[in-house]
Image (cartoon, rainbow, N blue to C red):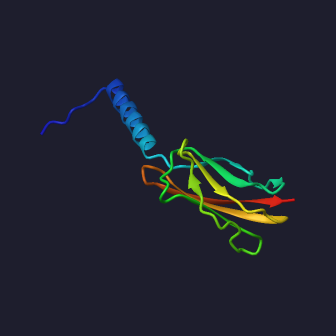
Amino acid sequence: MKLINLSRPARLSSALGAAALLLLSSAAFAHAHLVSSEPAANAEVAAPADITIHFSEPLEPAFSKIALTDAGGKPAAPAASQVDKHDARVMHLPLPTLRAGRYAVHWTAVATDGHRTQGDFAFTVK
C-alpha cells in the first residue's frame, strides 16, 4: 500500500475546503435564538397589551411557546402564545391588563429544523 504525500499547498487547500464544508453544514442546523423582545429584558414599562419576541430563525408553531408568570410564580396570561402568521420568526403572547409588579417571561422556541432553545427574561410594570 502506497501513501500519497500531499504538498503543503494541497494540504492547505484540503483543510480550507473541510472548514468551509463544516461552516455550511452548521448553518443548516441553526438554532432559533432570541433577537429582541417587547417589552425588553429588565425594562420598566406601562402595562403592555402583549409580549412579542423576535427570533433568528423561523419557528415551528406546534412546539414554540411563551409563558408569563407574576412575582409569585403564578401564571399571569391565560391566552396561548402564537407564532406570527406573516413572519415565522416572531411569536406573540396576548396579555390581560397587568397590575404593577415584576413579571417573568419563559419562552421555548423550536426551529423548523427541530432544534429547541429556551430562555427567560423579566420586566416590570409601573
**Quadrant of the image for the N terminus?**
top left
Choose between 88 and 16: the one closer to the eye: 88
Q: In this image, 52 relative to 45: left or right?
A: left
Residue appearing at x 64%, y 57% in the figure: 93
Whether residue 80 is situated above or below residue 57 in the rendered picture: below
- On the image, the x and y values in percent for residue 37 come to 69, 49
Number of labels in the image equals 0
Choose between 25 and 107: the one closer to the eye: 107
**Quadrant of the image for the C terminus?**
bottom right
Residue appearing at x 30%, y 26% in the figure: 7
- On the image, the x and y values in percent for residue 48 come to 77, 54
Q: Quadrant of residue 86?
A: top right
Choose between 3 and 67: the one closer to the eye: 67
Q: Quadrant of residue 73?
A: bottom right
**Residue placed furthest toward the right:** 126
Residue appearing at x 80%, y 53% in the figure: 43
**Residue placed furthest toward the left:** 1
- On the image, the x and y values in percent for residue 108 come to 56, 59
Residue appearing at x 36%, y 31% in the figure: 17
Q: In this image, 52 relative to 125: left or right?
A: left
- On the image, the x and y values in percent for residue 12 come to 38, 29
